[in-house]
Image (cartoon, rainbow, N blue to C red):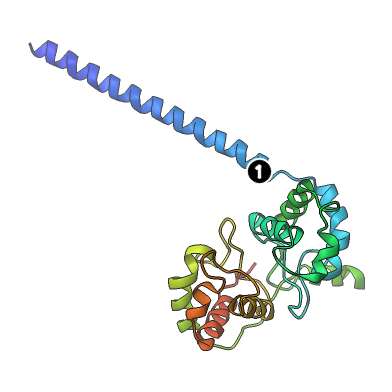
C-alpha cells in the first residue's frame, strides 16, 4: 500500500509538472505571437516617411520638434495611434484645422501614408539636455544638433497641486509619466503654450475631449488647476 501510494503521488507530481510545462510553452508561444503582431503593427517605410517629412518639417521641424514658440506641436515620440487618429480626423474634416487641409486631402493622404509618417515620427527620440560639442563641428552641424534638443521651460504654478490633480484625473489616460497610452497623447515634453491652446479649444467645444462631453474633465477644473497641471508636466520631463 505504501508503494502504491508513493506511485500515485509520483504520478500526480509528474502530471502537474507536465501541465505547467504545457502552460509555459503555450504562454511563450502567445508572447512570441504578440511580438510578431507588434512588429507588424509598427512596421513603416522610413524612406517614404522621410520624403513626407519635407512637407511636415515646414511647421513641425525637421525632427518633429514643433514650433519654437509652441505654435505647432511636437510630434517626435508622440503616440503613433494618437497621431493616426488625428490625421484621419483631419482627412475626414472631423477636426477643423485649415493649415492641415491641403496636406490631408483624401487623394493625397492614404492609409499607408498615415502608417508610414506616424510610425516614423513616433520612432524619433529627442534629447532633453544640450549636446556636448567636440569643437570640430561647423555652424550648420551645431545648429542641427541643437534642433534635436527639446527643452521645455518650467511653467509657473503650484506643482504639488498640479501633481495631485494630474494623478487623480489625467494619469489613467495619459500615463503617470505623461508619456501617453494607446490613443491618448503624450503630454510631457510638449510645448506648454500649445497644450494651453488645446485645453482652451476643448473647453470652448472646438475639439472633442471625451465622447460624452466635448469638454470632458477639463470643464470641472479651475483655471488655476489647469495652470498647475501644466506646471507639473514641465517638472517631470525625463533628462537624457
Front-most of 46 and 240? 46
**Residue 91 visible in image:** yes
For the image shown, how many numbered marks are present on the structure? 1
Which residue is drawn at the image coordinates 77% and 49% (left, top)? Answer: 116
Front-most of 89 and 120? 89
Q: Tell me residue 161's x, y (percent).
A: 46, 83
Instruction: Determine whether, in the image, residue 95 is placed left or right of residue 8.
Output: right
Q: Quadrant of the C terminus?
A: bottom right
Q: Dot 1, crowdedness within 10 Å: few (<14), some or many (≥20)?
A: few
Which residue is drawn at the image coordinates 51% and 36% (left, top)? Answer: 31
Front-most of 23 and 139? 23
Q: Secondary structure at mark 1?
A: helix
The correct choice, above or below, for 109 with respect to 180 in the image is above
Q: Tell me residue 11's x, y (percent).
A: 24, 16
Q: Tell me residue 196's x, y (percent).
A: 64, 80
Q: Quadrant of the N terminus?
A: top left
Instruction: Determine whether, in the image, residue 80 is placed left or right of residue 226.
Output: right
Front-most of 187 and 197? 197
Q: Tell me residue 89's x, y (percent).
A: 70, 60
Image quadrant assignment for residue 164: bottom left
The residue pinned by badge 1 equals: 41
The correct choice, above or below, for 132 with respect to 203 in the image is above
The correct choice, above or below, for 24 with respect to 168 in the image is above
**Residue 134 visible in image:** no
Amino acid at each position: 500500500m505504501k508503494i502504491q501510494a508513493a506511485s500515485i503521488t509520483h504520478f500526480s507530481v509528474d502530471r502537474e509538472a507536465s501541465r505547467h510545462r504545457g502552460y509555459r510553452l503555450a504562454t511563450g508561444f502567445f508572447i512570441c505571437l504578440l511580438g510578431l503582431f507588434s512588429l507588424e503593427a509598427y512596421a513603416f517605410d522610413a524612406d517614404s516617411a522621410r520624403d513626407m517629412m519635407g512637407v511636415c518639417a515646414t511647421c513641425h521641424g525637421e525632427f518633429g520638434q514643433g514650433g519654437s514658440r509652441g505654435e505647432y506641436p511636437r510630434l517626435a515620440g508622440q503616440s503613433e495611434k494618437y497621431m493616426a487618429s488625428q490625421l484621419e480626423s483631419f482627412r475626414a474634416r472631423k477636426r477643423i484645422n485649415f493649415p492641415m487641409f491641403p496636406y490631408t486631402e483624401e487623394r493625397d493622404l492614404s492609409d499607408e501614408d498615415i502608417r508610414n509618417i506616424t510610425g516614423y515620427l513616433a520612432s524619433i527620440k529627442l534629447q532633453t539636455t544640450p549636446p556636448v560639442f567636440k569643437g570640430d563641428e561647423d555652424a550648420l552641424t551645431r545648429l542641427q544638433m541643437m534642433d534635436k534638443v527639446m527643452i521645455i521651460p518650467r511653467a509657473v504654478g503650484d506643482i504639488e497641486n498640479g501633481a495631485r490633480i494630474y494623478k487623480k484625473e489625467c494619469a489613467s489616460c495619459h500615463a503617470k509619466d505623461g508619456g501617453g497610452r494607446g490613443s491618448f497623447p503624450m503630454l510631457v515634453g510638449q510645448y506648454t503654450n500649445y497644450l494651453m491652446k488645446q485645453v482652451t479649444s476643448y473647453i470652448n467645444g472646438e475639439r472633442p475631449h471625451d465622447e460624452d462631453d466635448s469638454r470632458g474633465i477639463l470643464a470641472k477644473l479651475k483655471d488655476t488647476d489647469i495652470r498647475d497641471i501644466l506646471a507639473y508636466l514641465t517638472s517631470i520631463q525625463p533628462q537624457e
